[in-house]
Image (cartoon, grey):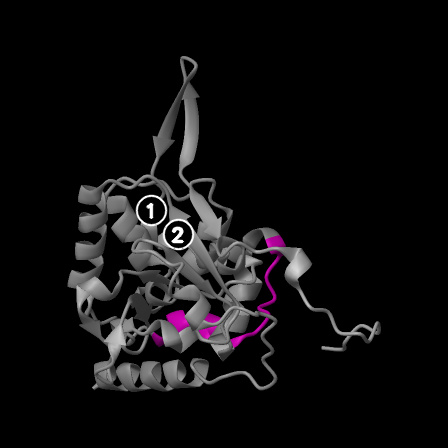
């Protein structure tokens, strides 16, 4: 009885948190069409989300980025829930691990974070790990775990905000954060933000638990290259045609 009640409450909270924010404004000039020729398998796509839950994640992680998906490419032969070709894999608290089209994030502020020098074998392992995760469901009966995200700006001191995500985090939080992607990179021993210690003038890397990662970590990681499609296609500022009006625009 209580299990069904908690699951129902979890579903309602997920639906509430997944509602879009009124007045979301994108400053990005990059479209899905711009991303497609530039993005590569293994790239992590960070998203400045427009959902209610996005506000809480941005506040707690002190970051622009509220969501992360990973690009596996069209060769994986994936389709989204509507039967359309899909190239991204992401985790969703309500739907579980799903494949989605790059078009889903057309018009959003995004950032491509690229792992470097992956071997073909490691790339295959990375993609296979993610593809086999599709269909994984998250137990949303732990509705208490979701309540923390209903506050756009939880009254938490700055130094404790990130820890609030990890404190007692259950499956809903692992779906909301970047656990899925961190797990996949952990499989091939690729660093994101490891703990580094020194012993006898030698650096030793220690893997942080995958449940502690957030979208921001891929942005600030020294092991991921930031790729901007506009610059990747031979950008030249001299070719910009500026408006003849000198007054700055209001956003």
Residue density around tag 2, few if under 14, some if 14–19, many if 20 or more, within 10 Å: some
**Above-or-below relation of 212 to 55:** above
SS label for mark 1: loop
SS label for mark 2: helix
**Above-or-below relation of 17 to 88:** below
Please name whichever residue, 208 or 87, is drawn nearer the observer in this view of the structure: 87
At a point 35% along the width and 34% down the height, the residue shown is 206
Residue 27 appearing in the image: yes
Please name whichever residue, 242 or 218, is drawn nearer the observer in this view of the structure: 242
Residue density around tag 1, few if under 14, some if 14–19, many if 20 or more, within 10 Å: few
Q: Position of residue 119 (x, y in %)?
A: 24, 40
Residue 139 appearing in the image: no
Q: Which residue is mark 1?
A: 209
Q: Pick out the residue farthest to the front.
A: 239
Quarter holding residue 62: bottom right
Q: Which residue is mark 2?
A: 212
Quadrant, the N terminus: bottom left
Residue 156 counted in the magenta span: yes
Disc 1, disc 2: CB below 8 Å?
A: yes
| Cα separation between marks 1 and 2 | 6 Å
Please report the bounds of the magenta region as a residue range: 143-158
Residue 175 counted in the magenta span: no
């Amino acid at each position: 009885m209580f299990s069904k009640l908690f699951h129902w409450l979890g579903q309602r909270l997920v639906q509430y948190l997944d509602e879009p924010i009124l007045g979301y404004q994108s400053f990005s000039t990059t479209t899905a069409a711009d991303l497609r020729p530039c993005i590569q398998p293994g790239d992590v796509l960070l998203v400045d989300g427009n959902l209610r839950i996005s506000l809480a994640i941005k506040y707690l992680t002190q970051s622009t980025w509220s969501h992360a998906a990973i690009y596996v490419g069209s060769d994986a032969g994936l389709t989204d829930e509507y039967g359309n070709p899909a190239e991204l894999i992401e985790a969703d608290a309500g739907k579980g691990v799903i494949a989605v089209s790059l078009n889903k994030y057309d018009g959003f502020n995004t950032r491509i974070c690229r792992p470097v020098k992956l071997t073909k074998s490691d790339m295959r392992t990375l993609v296979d790990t993610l593809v086999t995760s599709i269909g994984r469901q998250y137990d949303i009966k732990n509705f208490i775990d979701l309540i923390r995200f209903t506050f756009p700006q939880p009254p938490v001191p700055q130094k404790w905000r990130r820890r609030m995500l990890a404190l007692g985090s259950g499956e809903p939080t692992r779906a909301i954060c970047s656990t899925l992607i961190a797990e996949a990179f952990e499989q091939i021993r690729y660093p994101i933000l490891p703990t580094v210690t020194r012993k006898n003038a030698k650096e030793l890397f220690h893997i942080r638990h995958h449940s502690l990662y957030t979208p921001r970590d891929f942005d600030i990681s020294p092991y991921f290259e930031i790729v901007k499609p506009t610059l990747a296609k031979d950008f030249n500022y001299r070719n910009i045609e500026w408006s003849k009006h000198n007054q700055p625009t209001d956003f």
